[in-house]
Amino acid sequence: MAPTADAVVLADLGGVTALVIDVLRASTTIITALANGCDAIVPVTDPLDARRRAGEGGTGGARRNHGALMAGERRGEPIPGFDLGNSPLEFQTARVRGKTVFFTTSNGTRALLAARAAEAIGVAALVNVTAAAAWAAGAGRDVTILCAGSRGTRSLEDWACGGLAVDRILAAVPTAVLTEAARDALDTGRRYGGDVGRLKHDAPWARRLIAAGRSADVDACLRLDTTTLVPRYVPHVDKIVGDHR
């Protein structure tokens, strides 16, 4: 279990199923977009790469791919010139249905790209944690949970969500052996499992988003098991696609 994208050890990912978590907000946004008919999401490293990728496939000076959207944030703020930010509330059906979104965020997409060596990669958040854990446990492989964190430090909301995933994997596979980090996350997850809304006050990044006027985003992200959609990142086609259980 990795607390941040920077803590991912590539050599440890071979043959495992990975769950990537960025509750506030990239994972929740990805799940929402795909639930609302987005064709695929492509995680990219930076805004320049998003602009380049969104413009592939044609000629001329303007953006050429009319089926593409650019979305993301830096330090929680939308990127100038992009179609969408990183708010799940922006990714409504009318905006994203049938589109490919080139997506870059401060932490979440970094964690996804860091997970590329895993055998299978799922996107998890509070809104789908039970379905995501069932998907991971059902694969029959070792499971690694990769939390995005925030600027290289552990984020409470990701750690709690990871712990809830561990709890549900244990319910499905009682003989599972936990690492020390997984046991720590499990304790955290169980403290919040009865009321994940408490993270709105306890998690520093939640408080920062609220102070920036994004309380509605936080409310949308701090909901438990509202969907069974488990997005899968498929590196060999370089896309995140939907997978209903």
Image (spheres, helix red, strand yellow):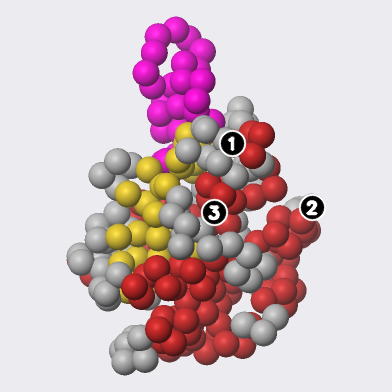
Amino acid marked by disc 3: Ile
Amino acid marked by disc 2: Gly
Q: Relative to residue 42, is residue 192 drawn left or right?
A: right
Q: Nearer the viewer, residue 177 or 179?
A: 177
Q: Secondary structure at mark 3?
A: helix
Q: Secondary structure at mark 2?
A: loop
Magenta range is: 42-70
Q: Relative to residue 57, is residue 155 drawn left or right?
A: right
Earlier in the chain: of badge 2 and badge 1, it is 1
Disc 2 + disc 1, Cβ < 8 Å: no
Point out which mark residue 88 bears: none
Report the quarter where the N terminus lies. bottom left
Mark 3 lies on residue: 31
The image quadrant of residue 72 is top right
Q: Relative to residue 20, is residue 9 drawn left or right?
A: left
Mark 2 lies on residue: 213
**Residue located at (42% from left, 73% from top):** 134
The answer to whether 223 is drawn above or below residue 193 in the figure is above
